[in-house]
Amino acid sequence: MEDKSVPDSWIKFRDIALYWLDFGVDGFRFDMAEMVPVEFWSYLNSHIKEKNSDALLLAEVYNPSLYRDYIHRGKMDYLYDKVELYDSLKHIMQGHGWTDHIPVVQKGLLDIEHHMLHFLENHDEQRIASPEFAGDAMRGKPAMVVSATLSTSPTMIYFGQEVGEPGAEDAGFGSPSRTSIFDYIGVPNHQRWMNDKKFDGGQLSEEEADLRDFYKRLLNLTINSKALMGAYEDIHYYNRDNTEGYNYRVYSYVRWQDDERLLILVNFDAVESYQFELKIPPAVVSAWGLEEGSEYELSDLLYDDARVKLRVEKGQGLFEISLAPLQSYIFKLQD
């Protein structure tokens, strides 16, 4: 780059970024990066990484056709996965989307999945608990399980999401349903967790405390799981084709690495329960080294309150399972 001529503004932006790196800033979040030529980002981010190779670079790019350009040429570490996974999950949570679309999204992003930042809330988007989105923070639980375990992508939690913040205040600048970054206004659920600066959740309702416990269990599980950085295989379509009672409100897939083998199963329906004999395809049975005629135990890692027997018959794995409304399981195959 030293023998190339660049606009003077590029040099100024570079100097600004390096100035803040000298102060210890270790990352940048770029707003609407796709409105700026990718060549600029290549220039700026190369200089940032040269000074601090561990600096985190996160950008808004909402045109999927540009994703790979801004990752590979623009040298972004992560892009918001908004118009693919987030929008799909939002539609499913609202009741008019089908889980059949999730494997399509995952397959389309497979080569860059680790660069796609998963989220269910941020300052631009509506709060899950707001009537304009889902009307109930509990409807976010199966979506959060999928968002956090579907791939090797990082997962972002927006403050107050884990206690069901509804964004209900009319702050003046933005309309209710979002927690605006432009207004000075309270966030009541989050403030109850803060509990007069004790930061212990002492004022949370029982439902809010239970929701936070769910997020705590899930996120700690993802941090410590080898399988969630390993292989992925969709079993949703196999069960759509072969399992009676399994439908577009349910979703399932498997993750594994070394000796850790996980099966994730969620119910997005807030009203209906489901009961069926879930099936593991022969390809997964083979990859997991399961033996014909043998029986194995699956235990739930999320709440440690369910154990089921998996049997292998005619090359496929089978087990009976019941799913309550909005219930999720992260099953681990026991040795």
Image (cartoon, rainbow, N blue to C red):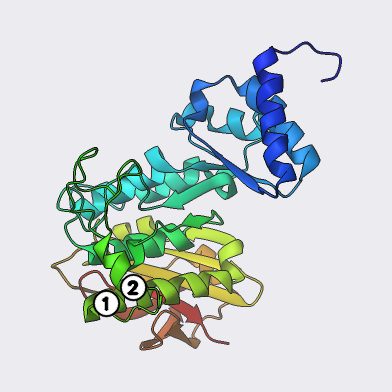
Q: Residue 175: x and y, percent?
A: 19, 41
Mark found first going from the N terminus, 2 or 1: 2
- The answer to whether residue 261 is above or below residue 100 is below
Of residues 268 and 101, the one nearer the viewer is 268
Dot 2: what SS? helix
- The answer to whether residue 272 is above or below residue 47 is below
Q: Is residue 50 left or right of residue 267?
A: right
- The answer to whether residue 249 is above or below residue 275 is above
Q: How crowded is the residue under tag 2: few (<14 C-alpha within 10 Å), some, or many (20+)?
A: many
Q: Residue 48: x and y, percent?
A: 72, 37
Res. 243 in view:
no
**Quarter where residue 243 is shown:** bottom left
Distance between the alpha carbons at the discs numbered 2 and 1: 6 Å
Q: Residue at x 14, y 53 (%)?
A: 131
Of residues 189 and 57, the one nearer the viewer is 189
Q: Is residue 123 left or right of residue 276?
A: right
Q: Residue at x 58, y 45 (%)?
A: 115
**Quarter where residue 63 is shown:** top left
Q: Amino acid at mark 2?
A: Trp
Q: Which residue is mark 1?
A: 204
Q: Residue 327: x and y, percent?
A: 28, 73
- The answer to whether residue 291 is above or below residue 113 is below
Of residues 306 and 204, the one nearer the viewer is 204
Dot 1: what SS? loop
Q: Is residue 92 left or right of residue 2?
A: left
Q: Amino acid at mark 1?
A: Leu
Is the C-beta separation of discs 2 and 1 under 8 Å?
Answer: yes
Q: Residue at x 45, y 43 (%)?
A: 81
Q: Which mark is residue 193?
A: 2
Of residues 264 and 234, the one nearer the viewer is 264
